[in-house]
């Protein structure tokens, strides 16, 4: 059983995978102030709630866009499973041809998403990840990662509207009734949902123009399910893309498990 941790700015997605696919998924809040022991307690609770015995975990992998908490999470995984997880980063075999100015600066989440998309779809590809930020990654016909774009996420944009103005409220991201709205809250929802969808459609069109040919478009991320249905372009939404990417990367890099011994502690 593989324990996969996808650390985002807002949430940590924890997946349990084997040859049959994803067995279970859980989420924890990303907390930069938590200690290794606090993460270990949370992780053990997640494992127990998932009906999985810690000794059934024979591999672990971590992808993180929040490097300051990596040490605590690595230690937490060791405490519970006795295994030091692989960490997505420089030196890991990815199978990607990264054509950026400085390939080492490519975020681990983008690496994982690109690896997963290429494992399941033929290039050229445009990969959209809608989390705290919205990222777009372009892969050409020769499977080269050309680059992409980073865009303020929907949640950040809504928060900026409410915080930066005196009369606009904090609202939830619910589906708007229509594009032309007749009250303030619905107008904010229309702008956030339809506006983001139109932005994605426009960015895809411009990226394809630079590529010189159409591309398959794959989307993931927690907010993707709210936005993608409103896009006019055909976009495949895969909410588990990054977990599948972590599985693929683990298979390329797995080593004989190194058991360092579990730490004992009492809840």
Image (cartoon, rainbow, N blue to C red):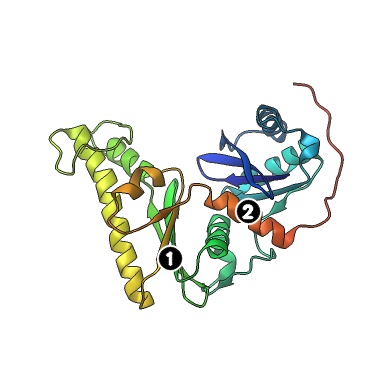
Task: Please state the horizontal and vertical placement of residue 11, each as a whole percent of the image.
Answer: 53, 39
Q: Residue at x 28, y 45 (%)?
A: 193
Question: Relative to 256, is 213 above or below?
Answer: below
Vertical placement of 126 versus 152: above or below? below
Q: Nearer the viewer, mark 1 or mark 2?
A: 2
Left or right: where does residue 218 sit relative to residue 228? right
Q: Quadrant of residue 260?
A: top right
Q: Which residue is mark 1?
A: 148
Q: Is residue 242 left or right of residue 128?
A: right
Q: Quadrant of the C terminus?
A: top right
Element on which disc 2 rests: helix
User: Residue drawn 30% across and 50% down?
Assistant: 196
The image shows residue 131, relative to residue 249, as above or below, that is above
Instruction: Locate residue 168, reporting x and y percent.
Output: 23, 34
Residue at screen point 45% across, 71% down: 124
Residue toward you, 206 or 30:
206
Tell me how many marks there are: 2
Q: Secondary structure at mark 1?
A: strand
Can you give x and y, in whole percent of width and height, for residue 4 in the image? 65, 46
Q: Report the disc number at residue 246.
A: 2
| Sequence order check, earlier mark of 1 and 2 | 1
- Residue in front for this viewpoint, 52 or 31: 52
């Amino acid at each position: 059983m593989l324990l996969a941790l996808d650390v985002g700015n807002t949430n940590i997605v924890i997946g349990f995978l084997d040859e049959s696919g994803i067995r279970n998924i859980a989420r924890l809040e990303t907390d930069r102030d938590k200690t290794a022991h606090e993460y270990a307690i949370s992780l053990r609770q997640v494992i127990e709630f998932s009906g999985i015995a810690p000794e059934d975990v024979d591999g672990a992998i971590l992808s993180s866009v929040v490097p300051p908490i990596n040490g605590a999470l690595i230690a937490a995984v060791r405490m519970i499973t006795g295994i030091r997880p692989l960490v997505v980063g420089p030196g890991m075999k990815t199978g990607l041809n990264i054509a950026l100015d400085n390939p080492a600066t490519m975020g681990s989440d983008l690496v994982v998403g690109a690896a997963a998309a290429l494992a399941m779809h033929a290039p050229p590809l445009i990969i959209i990840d809608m989390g705290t930020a919205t990222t777009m990654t372009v892969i050409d016909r020769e499977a080269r990662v050309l680059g992409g774009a980073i865009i303020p996420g929907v949640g950040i944009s809504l928060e900026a509207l409410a915080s930066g103005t005196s009369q606009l409220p904090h609202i939830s991201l619910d589906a708007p009734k229509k594009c032309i709205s007749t009250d303030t809250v619905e107008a904010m929802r229309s702008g956030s949902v339809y506006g983001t969808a139109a932005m994605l459609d426009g960015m895809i069109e411009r990226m394809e123009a630079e590529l010189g040919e159409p591309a398959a478009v794959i989307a993931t991320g927690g907010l993707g399910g709210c936005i993608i249905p409103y896009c006019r372009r055909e976009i495949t939404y895969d909410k588990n893309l990054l977990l599948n990417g972590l599985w693929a990367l683990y298979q390329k890099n797995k080593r004989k498990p190194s058991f360092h011994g579990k730490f004992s502690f009492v809840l």
